[in-house]
Amino acid sequence: QVQLVESGGGLVQAGDSLRLSCAASGRSISMDTVGWFRQAPAKEREFVAGMTWNRGSSDYADSVKGRFTISRDSAKNTVYLQVDSAKPEDTAVYYCAARRNYGLRYDLHEYDYWGQGTQVTVSS
């Protein structure tokens, strides 16, 4: 079992930066894939960024490419999402997720473990 705890959300202005963190505990996730999803009010949860833990291969949703960066610190079992040039449309609850099997996936149903979410609000 893996427990995921997100932090780092908050209220920022358009154009600002913030970094979300996701600390994993329970067992090593060195063979897992990790991802960030977000859910805005009245919208479905959507893929934002994902990374394979060992090789560090990553991909992003088109809406965040060039502005968001996913990274990990293996020693801390922590995944990060750097948000730069934030836009009001980035406002959402951001969730960290992990899957037991190796391989980057974009469908939220492919992920086995979820954090509780952290709110990001971007004002215009």
Image: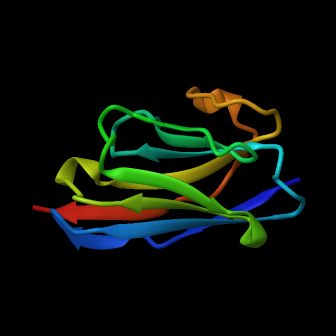
Quarter of the figure with residue 55: top right
Q: Residue furthest front?
A: 55
The residue lying toward the viewer, choosing from 68 and 57, is: 57
Return the x and y of residue 124 as percentages of the image width and height.
9, 61
Snapshot colouring: rainbow
Return the x and y of residue 104 as percentages of the image width and height.
64, 31
Return the x and y of residue 95 as percentages of the image width and height.
54, 52
Left or right of residue 27: residue 62: left
Residue drawn at point x = 58 percent, y = 26 percent: 107
Left or right of residue 65: residue 82: right
Quarter of the figure with residue 85: bottom left
Left or right of residue 23: residue 3: right
67 over 63 or under it: above or below? below
The residue lying toward the viewer, choosing from 121 and 80, is: 80
Left or right of residue 77: residue 48: left
Return the x and y of residue 122 as percentages of the image width and height.
23, 62
2 over 60 or under it: above or below? below
77 over 35 or under it: above or below? below
Residue drawn at point x = 40 percent, y = 34 percent: 61
Residue drawn at point x = 77 percent, y = 60 percent: 3
The residue lying toward the viewer, choosing from 78 and 41, is: 78
The residue lying toward the viewer, choosing from 43 and 122, is: 122
26 over 70 or under it: above or below? below
Q: Residue furthest left?
A: 124
Q: How many marks?
A: 0
